[in-house]
Image (cartoon, rainbow, N blue to C red):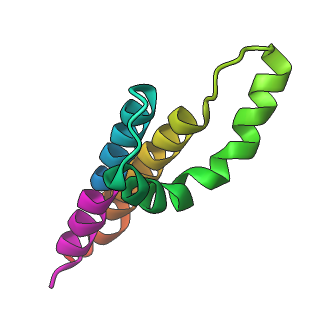
Amino acid sequence: MTMYAVFRTVDIFLWVVRTAILAYWLLTLLRFNNRLMQLLAKFVYPFVVPFRRPAMWVMRRTGLPIDFTIWFSVIGISIANELLWMLYWRVFFPMGL
């Protein structure tokens, strides 16, 4: 397996995580509460928890009653994905891996 395949696999996984987070957000807006929601919550929760504290800080500072946790997590995962590809193109690609 080449290094590109490893990076591509991680890229696909992060895409699945972002899609699952947005699906979870949409289903919570529509007030669904079934087995699919429970499975999505268990999958999404570890990726969303690190962004809860900054989102709560923003809510307290601005006074807005909107929870930004989901959006912060999607933005954070997207930034991590871009940094991952930057690492590949600057370090591993020139070495021919």
Residue 31 in the image, given as x and y percentages of width and height: 43, 31
Location of residue 94 with respect to 79 vertically, above or below: below
Locate the N terminus by quadrant. bottom left
Q: Residue at x 53, y 43 (%)?
A: 73
Q: Pick the residue in front: 42 or 38.
A: 38
Locate the C terminus by quadrant. bottom left
Location of residue 43 with respect to 76 vertically, above or below: below
In the picture provided, is 4 more to the left or to the right than 15? Answer: left
Name of the residue lying farthest toward the front: 34
Location of residue 8 with respect to 59 vertically, above or below: below
Residue 83 in the image, given as x and y percentages of width and height: 44, 53
Quarter location, residue 16: bottom left
Q: Residue at x 29, y 62 (%)?
A: 13
Q: Specify the principal SS of the magenta part.
A: helix
Q: Is residue 93 visible?
A: no
Location of residue 91 with respect to 84 vertically, above or below: below
Residue 50 in the image, given as x and y percentages of width and height: 65, 54
In the picture provided, is 66 more to the left or to the right than 1? Answer: right
Image: magenta residue range: 1-14
Q: Pick the residue in front: 94 or 79.
A: 79
Residue 54 in the image, given as x and y percentages of width and height: 73, 39
Quarter location, residue 87: bottom left
Name of the residue lying farthest toward the bottom: 1
Residue 2 belongs to the span the image colors magenta: yes
Residue 94 belongs to the span the image colors magenta: no
In the picture provided, is 93 more to the left or to the right than 45? Answer: left
Q: Is residue 37 visible?
A: yes
